[in-house]
Amino acid sequence: MVISFMFGLPGLFMLGPMATVVALYAERERKKALAGSDVKIKATDVMASVKVLSSIIFYPFYCGFFTFIFYEICRIYLELNRS
């Protein structure tokens, strides 16, 4: 259990902010869909599709950002750019 937590914690810190932003955006789109329709009751289909689409679009940029930050930290602290 402790080992699972140890390996899962960095992923939680890395993907937690993205999941929060995607969830807030999906909730906003759900409310917009509910306001514009007389038929929808919960609009969970809108929320799910918005979550999937925004994650597909946002995740590569998010990982690229973390890769760039990790590279810069390694370059600065480990002096990878020696001549």
Image (cartoon, rainbow, N blue to C red):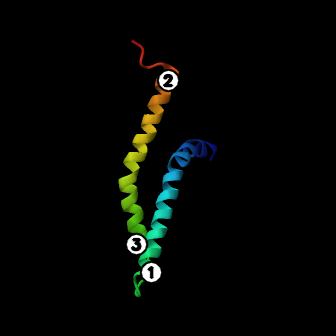
Q: Is residue 76 above or below residue 5?
A: above
The image position of residue 21, as x and y in percent, is 49, 57
The residue at the point 42 percent across, 83 percent down is: 40
Q: Are circles 1 and 3 on residues that touch, CB within 8 Å?
A: no
Q: Are circles 2 and 3 on residues that touch, CB within 8 Å?
A: no
- Which one is closest to the eye, mark 1 or mark 3? 1
Residue at mark 2: 76
Q: Tag 1, which secondary structure?
A: helix
Q: Report how far apart the C-alphas of labels 2 and 3 lie in the structure.
A: 44 Å
Amino acid type shown at disc 1: Ala
**Foreground residue among 14 and 68:** 68
Amino acid type shown at disc 2: Ile
The image position of residue 70, as x and y in percent, is 47, 33
Asked which quadrant contains residue 48, the reply is: bottom left
Q: Residues within 10 Å of mark 3 (few under 14, many from 20)?
A: some
Residue at mark 1: 35
Q: Tag 2, which secondary structure?
A: helix
Amino acid type shown at disc 3: Val
Q: Earlier in the sequence, mark 1 or mark 3?
A: 1
Residue at mark 3: 46
Q: Which mark is residue 64?
A: none
Q: Tag 3, which secondary structure?
A: helix
The residue at the point 44 percent across, 77 percent down is: 43
Q: Is residue 6 left or right of residue 22?
A: right
Q: Earlier in the sequence, mark 2 or mark 1?
A: 1
Q: Report how far apart the C-alphas of labels 2 and 1 lie in the structure.
A: 51 Å
